[in-house]
Image (cartoon, grey):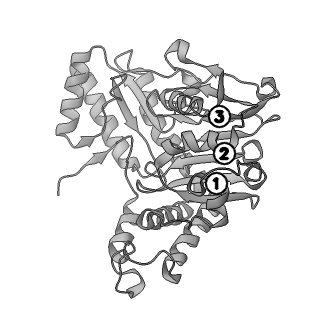
Amino acid sequence: MTTVYNFNAGPSPIPAPVLAKAKEEMFNFEQSGMAVMEMSHRSALYEKIHFHAIDQIRKVLHIPEEFEILFLQGGATLQFSMVPMNFLPEDKSAAYVLTGSWSEKAQKEASAIGKVETFASSKDNDYRYIPSVDLGGLPENTAYVHLTSNNTIFGTQWPDFPEKSHCPVIVDMSSDILSRNIPWENIDMVYAGAQKNAGMSGVTLVILRKSLLEKANSQLPPSLSYKQHADKQSLYNTPPTAAVYITGLVADWIDEQHGVEGMAQLAKEKADMIYNLIDESNGFYTGHASVPSRSMMNITFRLPSENLEKKFLQEAAAKGFVGLNGHRSVGGCRISNYNAVPVSHVKILKDFMIEFMNRHS
C-alpha cells in the first residue's frame, strides 16, 4: 500500500485507531448482525451509540450542563441560515465579524433572513489578521454577534475569544473544534461540521446555551427549529448514524490523548515546525497570515513564483503528500494540521520543504 500523507483541508484524516476500531466493529456492532448504518435509530442499540457520543463530546470539551448538544445535518453551511432563522427577529440586527470567506458566506445567508451589520473586518488587508474587537461596542438592538474561530482559506485563527457583553456570541468552529479549550462563559453557541476534527462528513455539532434556546423563534417549521431538535434529543428525524458513531469514537480517542488540552499542545508542536521553517527560509516561503493571527490548523504560504509553487505541488504529490494546494480562490499552498495528522507526517513534510528550498534557492 502506498503511503499517503493527508493534509486535506476537509474532509480530513480520521485518527488511525478510530478507523481500526470502526473496521473491527462497525459492520457487526456488538455482535448484533447489523452494521451501524442498518440498525433502527429508535433502537436501544443505536441509542447507546448516540448518547455515548453526546456524553463524550460534553466530557472532552468541558461543556457545562446549561448547554444542549445537538447532532444535525446539512453541514455548517445550513447553520448559516438556521442561526438567523432562530435568533434574528425583525426588530433587531445581527453583527458579523468578517475574517474570511466563510464568515462572508454566513453573513450573506443571514442577510436573506433579516438585518445584518459588519461589526469588524480584516478584508481590507486580504484577511491576513484577526481584528481586535470590543463586544461592549455593539448596538443595543444586536440580536447576536457571529464569529468564525478559524479561517481555513486564509490561515488565521482567533488566539483568544473576546469577552462577552450584552448580546449572545455565536461561533462557527468547523475547522478547530476539539483542538482547543472553549471559554463557555463568553460563548452562547458553537457549531461545527464534523469532517475536520470531529469525524466524518454528514453530521454537524451544535452546542448552545439553554437560555438562548428559550429565545428561539417558535414559529419555524420543526425541522429548522433548534428547540424541536433539542426536545427530541437530535432524534426528531433519522440522524446520520454512521457519522455520529465515528464522532463518538473520535471523542473517545481525544479523551485517551489527554483531551483537548493534549490536542492543543500537539497542534502547536506540529504548527511550530512549519512556521519556524517559514520564518527561517529568508523569504523562500512566505506566510499569508500575520504572526499574532496564525492558525494552528491551516498554514497558508506562497513560494517566490507561481511556477515554483506548481513544481512544489507536483513533486509533493509524487512523494505521497495530499491536499497541499491552497484554496482555488486564493492559490498558493496550504498545510492543514488537524488533530489526526501525525507528528511524523509533519516532520516528513518539513524535510521535503527544506530539501526543495535548498534545490531552488
Residue nearest the observer in this picture, 272 or 11:
11
Tag 3's secondary structure? Answer: strand
- Give the quarter of the image for residue 336: top left
* Residue type, mark 1 in image: Tyr
User: What x and y, as percent, mark residue 74?
Assistant: 47, 50
Q: Which mark is residue 86?
A: 2
User: What x and y, as percent, mark residue 218?
Assistant: 71, 52
**In 3D space, how far apart are the residues under numbered discs 1 and 2 (Cα atoms)?**
7 Å
Tag 1's secondary structure? Answer: helix
Residue name at image x 59 percent, y 53 percent: 221
Residue underneath mark 1: 226
- Asked if the residues shown at circle 1 and circle 2 are in contact, with their CB atoms under 8 angstroms apart, the answer is yes
Q: Nearer the viewer, mark 3 or mark 2?
A: 2
Residue underneath mark 3: 146
Residue name at image x 25 percent, y 29 percent: 355
Q: Is residue 361 visible?
A: no
User: What x and y, as percent, mark residue 34?
Assistant: 35, 81
- Give the quarter of the image for residue 223: bottom right
Crowd band around label 2 with a 10 angstrom C-alpha radius: few (<14), some (14–19), many (20+): many
Query: Mark 2 or mark 1, which is nearer the start of the sequence?
Result: 2
Q: Is residue 112 visible?
A: yes
User: What x and y, as percent, mark residue 65?
Assistant: 75, 62
Residue nearest the observer in this picture, 259 or 358:
259
* Residue type, mark 2 in image: Asn
**In 3D space, how far apart are the residues under numbered discs 3 and 2 (Cα atoms)?**
14 Å
